Structures are given as C-alpha cells and as structure tokens.
Amino acid sequence: MSAAFEAAPYLGMTAACRALDLSRATAYRHLSPRPPVEPAARPTPARALSEPERAAVLEVLHSERFVDQAPAEVYAALLDEGRYLASERTMYRILSAADEVRERRAQARHPSYAKPELLATGPNMCWSWDITKLRGPAKWTYFYLYVLLDIFSRYVPGWLIATRESAALAQRLIAETIEKEGRAPDTLHADRGSPMKAKPVVQLLADLGVTRSHSRPHVSDDNPYSEAQFRTLKYRPAFPDRFGSLEDARSFCRRFFGWYNEEHHHSGIAYLAPAIVHRGQADLILAGRAQVLAAAQAGHPERFVRGVPQPARLPEAVWINKPQSEVEDR
C-alpha cells in the first residue's frame, strides 16, 4: 500500500495501483479511513408481544398442566378453550430465549470418559486383558477365551476358555495368574465389559493394590495390545473356522500360547520371543546378535558400506495412548 502512495505522484494513482495489482478503491479507503459506525439498534416490531405478554405465555408453559407438553399441544388446547396467547412459533421463541428448548424429561447423560494414558518401561508394570469369542461346533455356539497380556513384553501370563463370560472366572484367572507370576502388575487395563467392571474383579484388584484402568466406550484403540494379540491368534494358519468341543479349543490354545510365548519373534519387541523379554534375557540375546553381525562385517567389510549393522533395539517404553507432548518431544 505504501509503495502505491510513493509511486502515485510520478505515475498517477490509477497506474500505480494497476502496476501493483491493487484495487484503487482499497487504496483510497486506506488513505481516508471511515470512522467506525455503531450498528443501529433494531426497532421492536409493532406486532411483537410486550414483556408482560411474553411473561404470561411463559407462565402458562410452566404451569403444572402444560409443563410436560409441547408448544403445539399447548396451542391447540388453548384454542379449544377459546384462548389465544401467541402462535406456536412464538411460544418456541420465548422458550428458546429462556434456554428451555430441550428434552424436558430427565434422561441419563453419558459421562465424559478420559482417554487412558498408560506407560510401561518393564515387565509386570501394566497388563491388559480382554475376552474374545471362538466359534463352537454348532451355529450360535461360542466359547469364550480370556487372555491376560503384559503390554511391555507381550507375554501372556494367563488364559482360560469357558462356555460363558463370568466375573467369577475372570477373578479366578487374575488371582491364579498373579500367584503364578509371584507379583501383581501395577496397573490392569481392560475395556468396559461386564466382567471387567464386576464387583468380584474390582474387589480383588483393590485388595491387591492394583490400579484399574478402562478403555473409553467403543474405542478399540484404547486396548491395542490385547486386540493385536487376538488378531495374531485368529490369523494363524492352523486356526479353525469352528472348534469341535471345549477341549478341542483348549488343546489348540495350549499349543498356540506355548508357541506365542516361547517361539514367536514379535515385531514390536525387536523380534524377540515374549518370554525372553519377560524374563529379562533380552540384552543377552541382542548382544549375541550384535556379535554375529560384527563378525559378518569383519569377514566381508566390502559388503557393509555403512559399517557394522546393528540389531533391532528393544523399546525403552511402551504406551497406551502416548500423550501428544511426548510425541512432539521425540
């Protein structure tokens, strides 16, 4: 804008604005700005209801007789009695001004659920658990697989299969698994299914001093490690479409969890077996891998143009819903 004013005495304002691709009217408005104009008060229409009349309409709508009825019903009832206070639309406007256009009946409101943010820097700090269905021998027949999972090591310390979802079974599984492990996790995370929130489970965790954590409703990403573990289970080549019996399902899961804990090279933990990480043996295995790579590089340095390759590293921390501040700091 200032360049246009500087060039105007030599080129003329029109030519200066054209050269700078600037609107001439805008330039003149900038040169002589108009004082701000206060918006004029909107006059009240002559046909509008007076304040006493509006108060009378609101009083009728608040009356015991009409408090639970919609303005359309109130309007019709008053006409049947030979009374006219205001149109149906005016009644709505009066209610809206009083912030009363809403569902009048008392209804349950969904509470605001906080996003869980859980951190594990070692085994047994945070377990997650969930229940999934396995198809039984007949249509509409299901078995229920309960699985406890350490989110840091991905190790499954306990599981069971039953014919139903049960808080008592969940309590038994958690108690027996903690006894077998010799310690309780600091936090136990689950979704909001009935067994997860049942009193027996809540009481057990309170007695053990374990912090309870729950996913938000209908947010599967809040329990990602259990969901991923179920995917690994159901995408195994040997996983059947249906199990012939409860014992058949248990037999399959015994083989699967033995393989998963002891043999499965998990991509999330540097392709180590979960049992290795859970038992604190990861550093030894990774050191052995580093020695093999160093020997390979020493034997054929021409094949390793970037120096000695390094094995995948074990994550230092595992999160459920890492805070945004932590993500930005990386």
Image: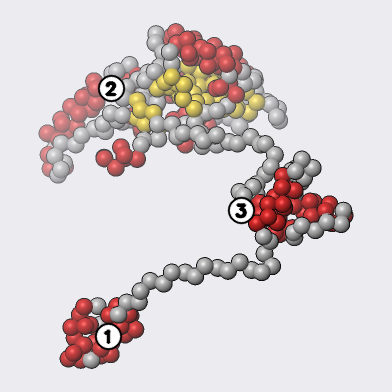
Circle 3 packing at 10 Å, graded few (<14), some (14-19), many (20+), is few
Q: Is residue 120 above or below residue 179?
A: below
Distance, label 1 to label 2, CA atoms, is: 72 Å
Say which of 21 and 10 sits in front.
10
How far apart marks 3 and 2 lie (CA) works out to 67 Å
> Mark 2, residues whose alpha carbon is within 10 Å: few (<14), some, or many (≥20)?
many
Say which amino acid is labelled 3.
Ala
Give the alpha-carbon distance from disc 3 to disc 1, as whole Å.
50 Å
Residue type at mark 2 is: Ala
Question: Which residue is identified by label 1?
Answer: 17
- Residue found at x 69% / y 42%: 104
Residue 85 image offset from top left, x and y in percent: 77, 57
In the displayed structure, 276 sits above or below 88; it is: above
Callout 1: few (<14), some (14-19), or many (20+) C-alpha neighbours within 10 Å?
Answer: many
Mark toward the start of the polypeptide (3 vs 1):
1
Relative height, residue 19 to residue 290 (above, below): below
Res 293 → quadrant: top left
Residue 124 seen in render: yes
Mark 2 highlights which residue? 282
Position in image of residue 281 (x %, y %): 28, 18
Residue drawn at the location 46% of the way across and 33% of the way down: 114
Q: Is residue 232 visible?
A: no
